Amino acid sequence: MTTLPSPVAAPASTSRSSRRWLALGVLALAQFLVVLDASIVNIALPVLGEQLRMDTTALAWVITAYVLAFGSLLLLGGRLADRYGHRRVFILGTAAFVAASALAGLSSGSEMLLAARALQGASAALLAPAALALLAHLFPAAGDRAKALGVWGGVAGIGSAAGVLLGGVLTASLGWQSVFFVNVPIGILVLVAIPLLVTRDTAGAATRLDLPGAATITGALLAAVGAASAVERLGFAHPLVWALAGASLALGIAFVVIERRAAAPLVPLGVFRNRSLSVGNVVMLLVGAAMVALFFALSVYMQAVLHYDALTTGLSQLPLAGALVIVAGVVPAVIARIGSRTTLVASLLLLAGGLVWLAAAPATAGFAAHLLGPTIVIGVGMGGAFVTTTQLAVDGVPGGEAGLAGGLVNTSQQVGGALGLAVLSAIATLRTDALAASGAGDGDALTGGFSWLFLGAAGLSAIAAIVALRARRS
């Protein structure tokens, strides 16, 4: 069987084989697993906690362990992919992700499960930036890359929305273990297909890895995500929150100093002179914050306030996912007609408008009357924003730094999601507590808190639209 010419070493003309679209499908499938695994566990948590005797704090760490490892190691994962070869690191990350998923499904206690979740996150930190780098190499032409990123952005959005639906279906029918075991056959399919579709790419120059830079940025991100996670449980004023935030700031400053002096830096600071990359990452940070908070709050609102069961909650989010998929497919054509900056700003304003509309939903909301319209608008805005932002973040990046660009944009999304969820959830809790203290019923108090969360997410989307105006006309 003839394999696809190397996306790194081959000329652009030889890389235009139709087989690269099959490779894109496989890469997107792997990305789907990574995004799905950040949300599919949510519905299974109550059953999981009962069977493994985990309290609320321990259950929170089932999510946090994954996010901490994933978000803090992404930059290192991207650089390892550039150094040792994108296909090689992608296969290694996928294999480790499959093994960690099986280990999580076989867990007989909380310690084993949390260790498996951390391993899943670390594996995803290798897999995700390497996959995006392979996409960038497979589609060097701007038009084809825009179409490929349309598929990529659609898959990322679907993974987040589908996690709630699949989590409910699998937990109800096969038990909580199935939300982890589902990754195994899909991961094996990816491992078999990629070597047949993409040949081994050329590794980077034989330079030493920037270990001090890797240690400081990993520590800084770990402390930042840890501080954000602690806010939700301990409050803004707790000493641990301030200690972690201070450690993150100190390590971040140390990282910048190290990178300015390193002969082979982990993140060459000059890469941020690429305005598209810089704008794309800032926008992804803000959109990631809004998106993760939205999906969390929408799921809880439907179950705790509207009393939907897990399956109905998942089905109710299908219009949002469907709108996202359709829009992701047409966004490349829209970009070609009106430009990436206009497309991105319009998408972000639509997302903000949909979130404001959703914030008006009452405690007695009907799906057709109060939820269907805003969730479709949100899906349209989110689909356009994800595709265009991802394209900006990898635009004009040299092949030798494609893994770095993939690590940066994935880091922005994950860290933004963790920070956004923590801060907006804390704001929602304060509002809910205030309403409850004033005599409001449980449903009205929760609805008021979620309304503030949705408005906060809308504000982040509006700020992202302002930032997007800094993107180049293209």
Image (spheres, rainbow, N blue to C red):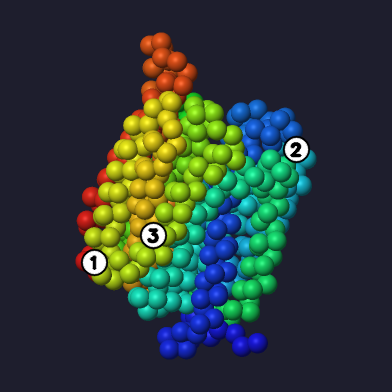
Q: Nearer the viewer, residue 189 or 320?
A: 320
**Could you tell me if residue 384 is visible in this image?**
yes
Picture coordinates of residue 459 (x, y %)? 29, 40
Picture coordinates of residue 213 (x, y %)? 46, 57
Q: Looking at the rendering, in which quadrant would you find the N terminus?
A: bottom right
From the viewer's perspective, tell me whether residue 322 is left or right of residue 44: left
Three-letter code, disc 2: Gly
Q: Nearer the viewer, residue 183 or 256?
A: 183
| Element at label 2 | loop
Decide: is 121 above or below 438.
below
Which one is in front in this view, the residue at disc 2 or the one at disc 3?
3
Label located before the other in sequence (1 or 2): 2
Q: CA distance from mark 1 to mark 2?
A: 54 Å
10 Å crowding of disc 2: few (<14), some (14-19), many (20+) = few
Picture coordinates of residue 363 (x, y %)? 43, 25
Q: CA distance from mark 2 to mark 3?
A: 42 Å
Label located before the other in sequence (2 or 3): 2
- The answer to whether the residue labelled 1 contacts the one labelled 3, judged by CB atoms less than 8 Å apart, is no
Identify the disc placed on residue 338: 1
Three-letter code, disc 3: Val
To which residue does mark 2 refer? 109
- The answer to whether the residue labelled 1 contacts the one labelled 2, judged by CB atoms less than 8 Å apart, is no
To which residue does mark 3 refer? 327
Task: Name, please, the residue furthest toward the front.
Answer: 368
Picture coordinates of residue 166 (x, y %)? 61, 48
- The answer to whether the residue labelled 2 contacts the one labelled 3, judged by CB atoms less than 8 Å apart, is no
Which residue is found at the position 59% from the left and 37% from the top? 310
Q: CA distance from mark 1 to mark 3?
A: 15 Å
**Could you tell me if residue 85 is visible in this image?**
no
